[in-house]
Image (cartoon, rainbow, N blue to C red):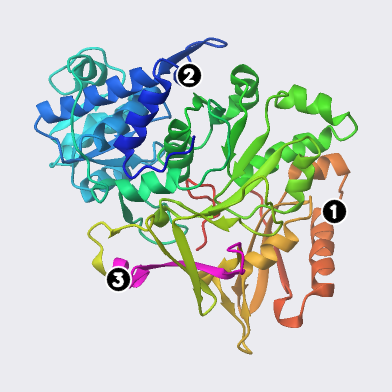
Amino acid sequence: MNKVCSSIREIVEYAQQQYGDADAIRYKVGKNETEAKSYCDLKRDSDGFGAALAALGEQGEHIAITGMTSYAWIVAYLGVVNSGSVAVPLDVALPAEEMCELIDRADATVFVADEIRADVLAIVRERCPKVKYVISMQKEEDTKEMLSFWSLVKNHPEEFICEVEPERLATIMFTSGTTGKSKGVMLTHRNLAENATCLDMKFPERSVLLSVLPIHHAYCLSMDILKGLSLGSIVCINDSLMRMAKNIRLFRPNIILMVPLMIETMAKKLEDAAGLPPEIVKREVFGEQFHTICSGGAYLPPAMLDLFGKYGIDILQGYGMTECSPVISTTVRWDIRKGSVGRLVPNCEAKVVDEEIWVRGSSVMQGYYKMPEETKETLVDGWLRTGDLGYVDEDGFVYLTGRKKNLIITKNGENVSPEELENKIGENRLVQEILVRESEGVIEAEIFPDQEYVQKAGVEDVKAALQEVIDTYNRTAPAYKRVYRLKIRETEFPKTPSKKIRRY
């Protein structure tokens, strides 16, 4: 059953009542050994952490959390928000200085961290004077400097009763941003809970999900964790992208959320196995039980849908942004339209203003934390200006053409969306990554070639081959959209934590 919930607490309570002692979270404890925690465990442990925060006098405060995806991370997050406090999830890969800066900017009074960031645990008090308590997810005993997360949870086993209003602030989530200073997006319980539960995607109850994206990211937190729990799913934790193929065999998932970069990596493996019967390839790579990839975060070439379709795998493409908790539109398996990023979710409406998509609904953020000017620029009379160019058809399907701030305005006043060119040229197998920009008055494409493909296809002159790719594109492009300069990169482009190329 798909129940629409208006607070995260409601999701956790409903899931515990419905699924009780059934597995909620599975994770590895050895090479091929897994352990599980039930829905009852999750409710009890997260209540325990909420009660511990209240006992420390920190209920209602801002609590920063960082670490790899783990049961402790999920317990900490749910414990924070369901006690009426505000969770501040931080990217575990941030440099120490930057992490301390965000902890300080978010006014966090407690810092909960995985020992993988022992460097930040050691300096956070000194760098962030507002932080009163530092909590380690792994330490078994409290010390003078640090509290033990699991000791706190176990010392507060009683059910923690706390009414959480849907409009209450639940999370401050920092955007990575392809340019500029990161902004703290303020999301309420209603924003997150309704975004996760408003659309019935007809996934069977007790589906097995493999969570592979960084957990501090809105897409993972909302769709893997909150939506997963609301459907009584078994959420399995992928401990490393390097071991993803092994973990697919170990956990045998039905569904995985991915970003296009991951899907394209898998597509190359499928192409290598093109001569083998599809059912054998599917069984070996994904397992017969696997049926769905949900894609979000960037453009996905439509050809991917056909490629994975051969193996009986649906790719459901979606579109969103942190400021919208994050899903704006998504595809459902019974209504897939190529080229579209799906239909608007039920709690979201859209309009197009000067080619830019604006959205409104119960998922739209409260604003940016302590950034009134940026908030005023982005929120206009309740409408969120997405910064994305595109259109919405009469059936509510969304089509994207580029980012407003990336637009190239040519000398004769034509508007060119670099993403449109990147998507077309990037369909060639020789192109691994591409960035289109204006340079000295002309359109330039900088390309990082796919070295593996260069070897496999026996390409001897990479520059000439890439120039031919550009020439082929230019033959059918209008003059103002042609690429007049090619630059070849030796290394991958720098990327944001959500794997988008940084534009400078």
Which amino acid lies under the numbered mark 3 shown in the image of this protein?
Lys
Mark 3 lies on residue: 376
Residue 418: mark in rendering: none
Label 3 crowd bin: few (<14), some (14–19), many (20+), radius 10 Å: few
User: Residue 45's x, y, as percent?
Assistant: 28, 20
Q: Which residues are drawn in magenta?
A: 374-397
Which amino acid lies under the numbered mark 2 shown in the image of this protein?
Tyr
User: Residue 364's x, y, as percent?
Assistant: 37, 58
Which quadrant would residue 86 be assigned to in this image?
A: top left
Label 2 crowd bin: few (<14), some (14–19), many (20+), radius 10 Å: many
Which amino acid lies under the numbered mark 1 shown in the image of this protein?
Asp
Relative to residue 87, is residue 321 drawn left or right? right
Which quadrant would residue 12 be assigned to in this image?
A: top left
Placement of 377 over or under 7, stated as above or below? below
Please name the residue shown 60% across and 42% down the image.
294
Q: CA distance from mark 1 to mark 3?
A: 51 Å
Q: Earlier in the sequence, mark 1 or mark 3?
A: 3
Q: Secondary structure at mark 1?
A: loop
Please name the residue shown 85% across and 53% down the image.
461
Residue 461: mark in rendering: 1
Please name the residue shown 66% across and 41% down the image.
263
Mark 2 lies on residue: 27
User: Residue 394's x, y, as percent?
Assistant: 61, 69
Q: Earlier in the sequence, mark 3 or mark 2?
A: 2
